[in-house]
Image (cartoon, helix red, strand yellow):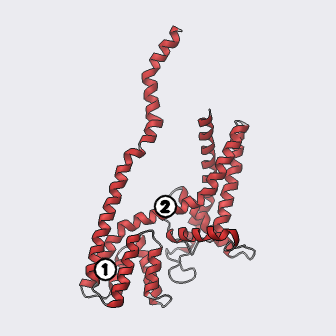
């Protein structure tokens, strides 16, 4: 009986969270349509008012709610900040997650905490009501599960976006390095080679690279600061080493094309290893649906006649 109660509680909590996050998805789509352009400036070159989100489904809806709530609280004069006191450590940890998710300038700590409280309380209330329709025990259990799932939902959505950005980087990094190396070997400068990549490719990495180059061309940041900030937006040690190699070679006049060729080969090897790892994990992930859906039906089909005969004999 207990597994059934837990399954019903999780189902009611997920339905509640999905219903609450749809509001953020509607605001996100409405803002994208009203802005029109993909790269609308918020506070300077490189900061999008409504950035491109890679994930789909429920994580995208929760991120839309985070964006909408952060903008609402940014213009509110009574907004309380949580950068000091017992929340300081959590805010510092959250800053890294937001930066690797590409939403550091759009999602505030206060907006994150407001959305977390909203989803936690809403999921707990609705889950308790749904569970109370069956029994008081299910109501208490579903309320606890809804509280935990609602509290974890915003951080889970940010981590999903972070992983999606990491996967997109693995597919685009090698071609970016090869294009820059090709431009350097053709006699172009680094800035021209960098512009050659993001002007001919439409990937998410190309958009972020274009914003970084616009920052240092307008004098808002130096080239080193803009490149390092671009690398911090992705959870990739290889990308960080690539940026440091570019900065070091440009500073001391060392040949850059040879170093980029070696990094391009390493990027392709890392992407191949990552794909092989995902393929190797696929059979393990299939064990759960196989054990939960296929195995009970097979056991019922095989042992059903035997059980019926035993029951008739008794």
Q: Is residue 271 left or right of residue 288?
A: left
Q: Badge 1: how crowded within 10 Å, few (<14), some, or many (20+)?
A: many
Q: Marks 2 and 1: CB-CB under 8 Å?
A: no
The residue at the point 37 percent across, 45 percent down is 283
Q: Secondary structure at mark 2?
A: loop
Q: Residue 281: x, y in percent?
A: 38, 49
Q: Quadrant of residue 158?
A: bottom right
Front of the two marks 2 and 1: 1
Pick whichever, 23 or 288, lies toward us.
288
As drawn, the residue found furthest toward the right would be 78
The residue at the point 39 percent across, 80 percent down is 244
Q: Is residue 126 left or right of residue 171?
A: right
Q: Is residue 6 above or below residue 28?
A: above
Pick whichever, 29 or 266, lies toward us.
266
Give the position of the C terminus as an image quadrant. top right
Q: Is residue 185 left or right of residue 33?
A: left
Q: Badge 2: how crowded within 10 Å, few (<14), some, or many (20+)?
A: some
Residue 202 in view (yes/no) = no
Q: Quadrant of residue 194?
A: bottom left
Q: Residue 67: x, y in percent?
A: 60, 68
Q: Residue 98: x, y in percent?
A: 55, 69
Which comes before the other along the chain, label 2 or label 1? 2
Disc 2 target residue: 55
The residue at the point 65 percent across, 71 percent down is 88
Give the position of the N terminus as an image quadrant. top right
Disc 1 target residue: 180
The residue at the point 54 percent across, 67 percent down is 97
| Count of marks, rendered view | 2
Q: Is residue 52 above or below residue 223?
A: above
How far apart in space, not on screen, are marks 2 and 1 (Cα)? 28 Å
Q: Secondary structure at mark 1?
A: helix
- Residue 89 is labelled as none
């Amino acid at each position: 009986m207990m597994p059934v109660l837990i399954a019903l509680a999780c189902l009611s909590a997920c339905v509640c969270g999905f219903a609450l996050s749809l509001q953020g998805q509607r605001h996100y789509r409405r803002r994208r349509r009203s802005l029109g352009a993909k790269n609308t400036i918020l506070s300077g070159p490189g900061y999008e008012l409504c950035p491109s989100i890679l994930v789909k489904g429920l994580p995208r809806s929760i991120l839309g709610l985070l964006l909408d709530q952060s903008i609402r609280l940014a213009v509110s004069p009574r907004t309380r900040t949580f950068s000091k006191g017992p929340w300081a450590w959590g805010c510092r940890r959250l800053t890294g997650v937001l930066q690797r998710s590409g939403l550091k300038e759009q999602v505030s700590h206060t907006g994150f905490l407001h959305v977390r409280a909203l989803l936690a309380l809403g999921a707990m209330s609705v889950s308790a009501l749904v569970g109370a329709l069956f029994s008081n025990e299910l109501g208490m259990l579903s309320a606890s599960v809804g509280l935990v799932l609602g509290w974890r939902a915003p951080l889970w959505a940010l981590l999903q976006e972070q992983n999606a950005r990491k996967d997109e980087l693995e597919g685009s990094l090698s071609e970016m390095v090869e294009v820059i190396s090709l431009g350097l070997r053709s006699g172009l400068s680094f800035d021209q080679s960098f512009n050659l990549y993001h002007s001919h490719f439409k990937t998410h990495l190309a958009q972020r690279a274009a914003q970084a180059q616009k920052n240092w061309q307008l004098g808002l940041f130096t080239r080193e600061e803009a490149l390092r900030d671009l690398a911090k937006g992705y959870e990739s040690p290889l990308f960080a080493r690539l940026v440091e190699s570019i900065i070091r070679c440009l500073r001391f006049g060392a040949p850059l094309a040879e170093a980029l060729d070696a990094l391009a080969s390493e990027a392709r090897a890392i992407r191949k290893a990552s794909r092989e790892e995902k393929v190797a994990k696929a059979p393990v992930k299939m064990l759960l649906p196989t054990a939960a859906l296929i195995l009970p039906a097979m056991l019922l089909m095989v042992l059903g006649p035997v059980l019926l005969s035993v029951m008739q004999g008794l």
